Amino acid sequence: MQLLDGKFLSQQIKQELAAEVAEIKSQGGKIPHLVAILVGTAGRSETYVASKMKSCEEVGMTSTLIRFDDSVSEDELIEAVQAVNANPDMDGLIVQLPLPAHISADKIMETIDPAKDVDGFHPINIGRMAKGLPAYISATPQGILEMLKRYEIETAGKHCVVVGRSQIVGLPMSILMQRNTNPGNCTVTLTHSRTQNLGEICRSADILIAALGRPEFITADMVKDGAVVIDVGLERVADASKKSGFSLKGDVKFDEVAPKTSSITPVPGGVGLMTICSLMQNTLKAARKEIYQ
């Protein structure tokens, strides 16, 4: 069993990014600038955004955090997004999700300039991705592709089962894994909460990607021997033995599934760290205008 170590890969990628940014700086070029908009003070969102800002600092990029209270109106938030769109110094923009119930996340995502949409959530970027055109690919799927590529996991001709159909992970992952690229060229089955015979379908997977947000849902009897298992889940589960009072669990019951696999990602230390690296890579592309001129 091979552990797909997101911590090791993320450090490697950050070193590569830091070298590229240093080269840009030495030539007097434009330093990539990522802007994050955070609404409210939810602990998980605070943690995610802080990690993204810290990663920018580590690789030499500029970052700006714009904060709003939960009471911010949708119009005010749209104005803030439009201001970033209009600022030529700001290359990439992320709006941390989830947003309060009175704000339409779809409307906010559609307001972001596709050329600054480094999260890859704008319908234009999703459409370009589906057509195989240059696009910002959402950070988690892109991180998974990067991991498969760097660990030289063979995907061509394999059966890939994706569990979960979210627009952020499951749906784009299913599209990416069937494209005529490397990684890619899989036969893909996209499953979800209404799928019948889910266990049977999962057992047929050469590559199983679990992205449904249900701790330890994937058990050993759902995984065939020698499968590659990618765990996207990251949930806090009450654990009295921990000082914090909780443990971090993925969608896969790691201890019983891991011995059956050829390769598996841990939680934590797997896909999550790759997600942040992908965001940094997209921000560099935005500064270089690699996707949109």
Image (cartoon, grey):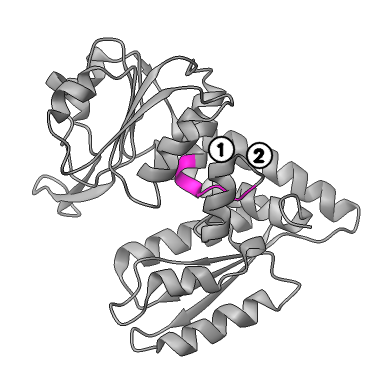
Q: CA distance from mark 2 to mark 1?
A: 6 Å
Res 97 visible: yes
Q: Is residue 204 left or right of residue 263?
A: left
Q: Residues within 10 Å of mark 1 (few under 14, many from 20)?
A: some
**Rendered-image quadrant of the C terminus:** bottom right
Foreground: 225 or 55?
225
- Looking at the rendered structure, the secondary structure element under dot 1 is helix
Q: Amino acid at mark 2?
A: Gln
Measured as percent of width and height from the top left, residue 30 is found at 81, 61
Residue 238 position (above or below residue 263): below
Mark on residue 15?
Answer: 2
**Does 78 sit left or right of 207 as displayed?**
right
What segment carries the magenta color?
A: 135-141
Please state which amino acid type lies under the numbered disc 1. Gln
Q: Is residue 38 above or below residue 247?
A: below
Asked if the residues shown at circle 2 and circle 1 are in contact, with their CB atoms under 8 angstroms apart, the answer is yes
176 or 5, nearer to the observer: 176
Can you see residue 7?
Answer: no
Question: Quick check: 145 left or right of 236?
Answer: right
Q: Which residue is mark 1?
A: 11
Residue positioned 52% across, 52% down in the render: 126
Please state if 262 lies on the left or on the right of 125 as rendered: left
**Quarter of the image containing the N terminus?**
top left
Q: Position of residue 153 (x, y in %)?
A: 48, 18
In this rendered view, identify the residue nearer to me: 13 or 98: 98
**Badge 2 density bin: few <14, some 14–19, many ≥20, Cα 10 Å:** some
Q: Secondary structure at mark 2?
A: helix
